[in-house]
């Protein structure tokens, strides 16, 4: 009976994870639709980066507003998020080099694409964390 419960829980977790992977994390524009105009393409990436950062910020604020933390603490989450911001910058600098005035537009687009990708990964990580936004006794993982 215990093995059956574990198997059912595993299947449920995998199904929720698969659903979450297909669910849009935020309103993201299709930049390929405006590729003919360099200015519009650049603006599309800037808009997507801003939208990804806004989605992460909303989720972070939601998690920080919890009354109970099943893992860690409010201070711990704040510290981890500050470290993650440093990680994101270093990861994209590692992949594409540090930004400079001499860099081309293609460089900026690649760097922005990296920041969007890493931010989306972070949103998925935070969505998978347990939260307790419903009170002291209601603690469940985020399921979107």
Image (cartoon, rainbow, N blue to C red):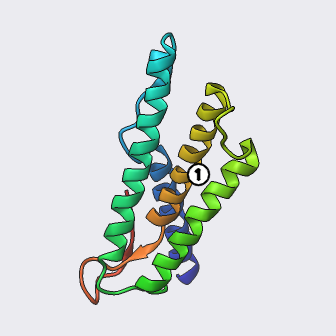
Circle 1 sits in a helix, a strand or a loop, which is it?
Answer: helix
Q: Residue furthest front?
A: 101
Q: Residue furthest left?
A: 135
Percent of width and height locating residue 102: 69, 32
Image point 49% across, 22% down: which residue?
41
How many marks the image carries: the answer is 1
The relative height of residue 114 versus residue 17 in the rendered view (above or below) is above
Along the line of sight, which residue is nearer the eye, 64 or 40? Answer: 40
Percent of width and height locating residue 49: 47, 42
Image point 52% across, 52% down: which residue?
119
Percent of width and height locating residue 134: 24, 78
Is residue 128 in view? yes
Q: Residue furthest bottom?
A: 136
Image point 46% across, 35% down: which residue?
46
* Mark 1 Cα-neighbour bin, 10 Å: few <14, some 14–19, many ≥20: many
The relative height of residue 142 versus residue 79 in the rendered view (above or below) is above
Image point 44% across, 63% down: which residue?
127
Along the line of sight, which residue is nearer the eye, 48 or 103? Answer: 103
Quarter of the picture containing the C terminus is bottom left
Is residue 24 in view? no
Residue highlighted by disc 1: 118
Relative side of 30 to 119, left or right: left
Percent of width and height locating residue 35: 51, 15
The relative height of residue 132 versus residue 35 in the rendered view (above or below) is below
Relative side of 104 to 47, left or right: right
């Amino acid at each position: 009976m215990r093995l059956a419960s574990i198997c059912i829980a595993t299947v449920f977790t995998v199904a929720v994870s698969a659903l979450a992977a297909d669910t849009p994390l935020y309103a993201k524009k299709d930049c390929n639709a405006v590729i003919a105009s360099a200015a519009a393409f650049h603006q599309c990436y800037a808009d997507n980066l801003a939208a990804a950062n806004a989605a992460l910020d909303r989720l972070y604020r939601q998690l920080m507003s919890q009354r109970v933390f099943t893992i860690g603490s409010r201070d711990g989450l704040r510290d981890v998020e500050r470290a993650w911001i440093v990680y994101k910058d270093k990861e994209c600098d590692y992949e594409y080099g540090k930004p400079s005035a001499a860099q081309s537009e293609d460089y900026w687009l690649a760097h922005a694409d990296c920041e969007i990708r890493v931010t989306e990964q972070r949103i998925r990580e935070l969505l998978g964390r347990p939260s307790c936004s419903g009170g002291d006794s209601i603690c469940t993982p985020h399921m979107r």
